[in-house]
Amino acid sequence: MNSDLIHPDIVLRSLRRHQDPQLRAAAICDIAARQTRSPLAAYYSTYKQTVKQRNLRRLGLTSHIGFIRLPESLAMESEVFDVITLGEKAAVRNSEEGPFEEIILQSTMRSGMAVLIDEGKGLSGVLIVNHNAPFHYTGDYIRVFEQLAQLACCIQGGVDG
């Protein structure tokens, strides 16, 4: 795979078509799943956050591709959030021995990535992809995933409106 496979113009056009935050989150999940060849993609954000989740500092599940049952919320206080907010890079788990256990959303998944979708006004959401094969996410997939996050942040208003 070559990281040039993600075409910024096509991605931006696709995301701009969706003014509704829920539809835009679904489009981001779809693009992430296709570009990284992942059977599972999920977007957790402040958009679907309940009052209880906000008080517990958790993001709500906004959209997903793949498995029907996923965690309804994700803790904002974790090593994954520290890495993706401070380092502005994807957090990657490629084996059962690796760090960031919380980005594996289903027990059948063996590798995963998480990246911040930030519209410049602070945390707006986290995009996660999972694969059932260990060591699925190589440098090219990681670069494409991070590039998608950067493009999603370019959309006026971000994913959350």
Image: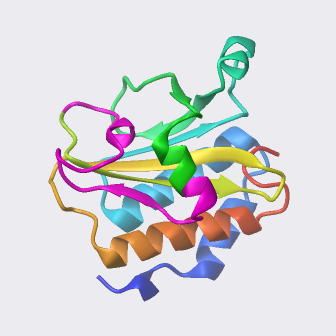
The secondary structure that dominates the magenta segment is: loop
Q: What stretch is highlighted in magenta?
A: 84-107
Horizontally, is 80 left or right of 88 in the view? left
Percent of width and height locating residue 7: 54, 81
Q: In which quarter of the image is residue 36?
A: bottom left
| Residue at 40% across, 56% down | 33
Horizontally, is 107 left or right of 99 in the view? left
Q: How many marks?
A: 0
Question: Is 17 inside the magenta-drawn segment?
Answer: no
Q: In front here: 81 or 32? A: 81
Percent of width and height locating residue 11: 60, 71
Q: In this view, does 48 lie above or below 81?
A: above
| Residue at 33% across, 77% down | 139
Question: Is 85 inside the magenta-drawn segment?
Answer: yes
In which quadrant is the N terminus drawn? bottom left
Percent of width and height locating residue 95: 18, 51
Q: In front here: 146 or 66? A: 146
| Residue at 60% across, 76% down | 10
| Residue at 71% across, 34% down | 46
Horizontally, is 42 left or right of 125 in the view? left
Percent of width and height locating residue 135: 18, 61
Colouring rule applied to residues:
rainbow
Q: In front here: 101 or 117? A: 101
Horizontally, is 92 left or right of 98 in the view? right
